[in-house]
């Protein structure tokens, strides 16, 4: 997909952590009239109000998806509607239905309508048996969580639709995403978001992962950049299509607390470990090797743990001072 004025975008899961910020970024890039943000929930907080078209869409309804594609002449879908790892583990049957059923419907619709599709996979697609330090692009993938099973299956399904039908499928494996807009909805890496809110509000945080659990992480502006850069990349340069490892920073809860303490010296953290999320985190990469994305489409993150922490605290502090947090 090239960046052109004919681009018409549909985002599913647009009220989620990534969707809410990606919808606005895409509206700024292609014009808000060319971006349809959709979600199964209502935009009760007005997150996307004033930013183009927002509509209700259930990705489990193939008919609803097709109707939107036809009505708006959609050329590219960012398919973000999915359940994250911790909530998926609580209800694996529902997670399979939404994560796989939704993706299947979207792929079938884009096959018929000739659109491109962005599918976000995750560090969660890896599992035990994977090299966890510098996880290669092409690695052993035996996830033990239902979330991971749906992510690796989703990668394969996207590869299949590209190989079998020539659908323009593209995607990345995101690390944990840190942001200050919509909260993540029940993931294993959520501590790295919650900690900032708690640091500003209470100067203390109880972490649900052990202090030395290293995980791959990324700040939202880089996550948005990864999605858009990949969808605008020259297809002739792409030897891989889906599931590019993208990495930006990695740290443990203890590292992040130390970084926050540089700005808030009396910040304190203690631990109350959640065994389910700890088990998931222990099976995920400490950091991925993203040299393939760098080579094939020029991936390069901007934010480090230092600049991300500074930015998060600055934004949340301002909101707190204005009585908005
Ligand atoms: N942030 C996600 C989760 O924790 C990982 O992709 O579920």
Image (cartoon, rainbow, N blue to C red):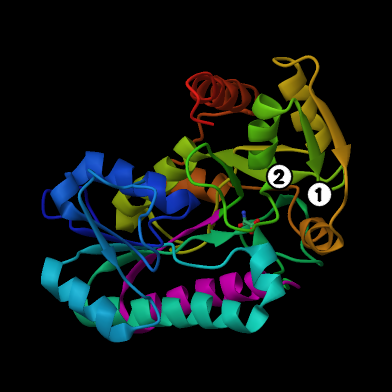
Q: Residue under circle 1?
A: 208
Q: Is mark 1 within 8 Å of ligand 1?
A: no
Of 199 and 45, the residue lying toward us: 45
Residue at (79, 44) in percent of width and height: 214
Q: Position of residue 136 (x, y in %)?
A: 67, 55
Q: Earlier in the sequence, mark 2 or mark 1?
A: 2
Q: Judge whether residue 259 is colored magenta.
A: no
* Circle 1 Cα neighbour tier, 10 Å, few/some/many (<14 / 14–19 / ≥20): many
Q: Position of residue 186 (x, y in %)?
A: 63, 58
- Could you tell me which secondary element the residue under label 1 belongs to? loop
Residue at (24, 69) in percent of width and height: 115
* Circle 2 Cα neighbour tier, 10 Å, few/some/many (<14 / 14–19 / ≥20): some
Asked if residue 142 can be seen in this view, the reply is: yes
Asked if residue 4 can be seen in this view, the reply is: no
Task: Identify the disc placed on residue 191.
Answer: 2
Quadrant hosting residue 66: bottom left
Q: Judge whether residue 153 is colored magenta.
A: yes
Q: Please provide the residue range marked out in magenta.
A: 144-173
Q: Is residue 312 left or right of residue 146?
A: left
Of 250 and 137, the residue lying toward us: 250
Quadrant hosting residue 39: bottom left
Residue at (41, 62) in percent of width and height: 13
Q: Main secondary structure of the magenta part?
A: helix
Of 172 and 52, the residue lying toward us: 52
**Distance of mark 2 from mark 1, alpha carbons?**
7 Å
Q: Is residue 323 above or below residue 138?
A: above
- Could you tell me which secondary element the residue under label 2 belongs to? helix
Q: Does the CB distance between marks 2 and 1 fall below 8 Å?
A: yes
Residue at (68, 50) in percent of width and height: 189
Q: Is residue 112 above or below residue 181?
A: below
Q: Position of residue 64 (x, y in %)?
A: 26, 80
Ligand 1 lies in quarter: bottom right
């Amino acid at each position: 997909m090239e960046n052109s004025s004919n681009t018409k975008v549909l985002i599913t899961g647009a009220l989620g952590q990534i969707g809410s910020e990606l919808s606005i970024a895409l509206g700024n890039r292609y014009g808000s009239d060319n971006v349809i943000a959709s979600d199964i929930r209502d935009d009760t907080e007005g997150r996307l109000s004033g930013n183009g078209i927002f509509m209700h869409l259930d990705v489990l309804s193939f008919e609803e998806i097709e109707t939107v594609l036809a009505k708006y002449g959609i050329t590219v879908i960012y398919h973000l509607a999915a359940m994250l790892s911790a909530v998926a583990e609580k209800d694996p049957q529902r997670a399979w239905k939404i994560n796989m059923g939704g993706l299947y419907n979207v792929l079938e619709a884009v096959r018929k309508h000739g659109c491109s599709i962005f599918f976000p996979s995750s560090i969660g697609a890896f599992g035990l048996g994977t090299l966890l330090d510098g996880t290669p692009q092409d690695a052993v993938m035996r996830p033990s969580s239902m979330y991971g099973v749906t992510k690796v299956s989703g990668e394969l399904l996207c590869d299949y639709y590209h190989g079998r039908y020539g659908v323009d499928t593209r995607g990345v494996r995101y690390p944990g995403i840190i942001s200050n807009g919509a909260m993540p909805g029940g993931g294993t890496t959520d501590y790295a978001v919650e900690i900032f809110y708690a640091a500003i509000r209470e100067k203390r945080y109880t972490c649900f992962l052990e202090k030395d659990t290293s995980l791959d992480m990324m700040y939202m502006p880089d996550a948005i950049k990864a999605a858009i850069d990949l969808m605008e990349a020259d297809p002739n340069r792409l030897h891989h299509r889906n599931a590019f490892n993208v990495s930006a920073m990695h740290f443990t809860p203890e590292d992040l607390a130390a970084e926050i303490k540089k700005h808030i010296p009396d910040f304190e953290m203690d631990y109350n470990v959640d065994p389910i999320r700890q088990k998931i985190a222990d099976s995920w990469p400490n950091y991925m090797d993203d040299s393939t994305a760098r080579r094939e489409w020029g991936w390069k993150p901007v934010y480090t743990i230092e600049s991300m922490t500074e930015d998060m605290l600055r934004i949340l502090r301002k909101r707190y001072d204005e009585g908005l947090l």
